[in-house]
Image: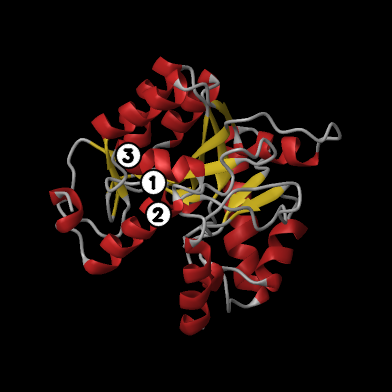
Amino acid sequence: MNRRKRDLPFKKRLKNNIGDVSSLFPRYAADKNSIRVLTYHNITDRPVPNEWGEMTTPHELFERQMEYLKENGYNTISAREVFEVLVSVDGNISEKTVCITFDDGYKDNYENAYPALEKYGLKATVFVTAGFIGKGKGAFGEYLSWREIREMKKSGVFTFGCHSFSHRNLVGLREDELDEEIKGGKDVLEDATGSEAETFAYPFGWHSAFNKQVRDAVEKQGFLCAFTGVQGANTRKTDLFRLRRLRVSWMDHMEEFQKVLIGAYDWYSAYQRVVSTWKR
């Protein structure tokens, strides 16, 4: 066992070992009719040692991952384009189609991710927690300003979606509270950018963070689709308001990143469901 794995907590080490085995039999590697959506949070110059929440990705590692996508022929599309592709009538999804997303709206998405994406000609979508924008620091750094968001949007590299107003778990909220989080976040984002907010990402994202009531409330507000944090790829059979994503962080060195792309961790969705059911 290499030192990198040996230093991981048991649960993380077990996950990686299972991933090693499942990477020999990638579920979607040969499937041209699926889309993988990557989820990042912070792209940082100040890595946090042993940050097991997997919220941070070193700037240098992120750039190498983007270079890998470019050099290996991956086609990046926006979150809105994920919807367009999945509902298109031609029936075909181009091989190696990937959507890059960022959650929360941290300033380092502008400082570090933006230049790397622009350098390699890649697209991305940021799901912003509207009530946090321009309000100083969060748990992992400062948030974007509306000026930076407008600049990123104008560049054509980024599109922006809604991640609620204040990042509450939407399950269990009263109808008026749901309206405040979903419609309130949408209204703020649209007013600040001058464009319609068409895509949504559930805060926290596991099965315990959305249910039929929440799913239907998001659809009711006019969003085209919504993204979860549930592991896996998306096909034409995937519910447009339960789209799957793949978290990427400092733990995903290049070998792990390649495993994520070929579906070596799709099985993890079953674990997520069990844990979410237990939490409920």
The image shows residue 176, relative to residue 155, as above or below, that is below
Q: Residue at x 48, y 69 (%)?
A: 272
- How far separated are the C-alphas under marks 3 and 1? 12 Å
Residue where numbered disc 3 is placed: 255
Q: Amino acid at mark 2?
A: Val
Residue 180 drawn at (x, y percent): 60, 63
Secondary structure beneath dot 2 equals helix
Secondary structure beneath dot 3 equals helix
Residue where numbered disc 2 is placed: 21
The image shows residue 179, relative to residue 187, as above or below, that is below
Q: Earlier in the sequence, mark 2 or mark 3?
A: 2
Give the foreground label among 2 and 3.
2
Residue 196 drawn at (x, y percent): 68, 38
Residue where numbered disc 1 is placed: 248
Residue 67: name its quadrant. Answer: top left
Whether residue 96 is visible here, answered yes or no, is yes
Q: Residue at x 31, y 36 (%)?
A: 254
Query: Dot 1: few (<14), some (14–19), or many (≥20) neighbours within 10 Å?
Result: many
Horizontal relation, residue 74 to residue 239: left or right = left
Horizontal relation, residue 269 to residue 184: left or right = left
Query: Dot 2: few (<14), some (14–19), or many (≥20) neighbours within 10 Å?
Result: few
- How far separated are the C-alphas under marks 2 and 1? 19 Å
Asked if labels 1 and 3 touch by Cβ distance under 8 angstroms, the answer is no
Residue 248 vs residue 162, the one in the foreground: 248
Secondary structure beneath dot 1 equals loop
Q: Which mark is residue 11?
A: none
Q: Residue at x 71, y 41 (%)?
A: 83
Residue 257 drawn at (x, y percent): 38, 40
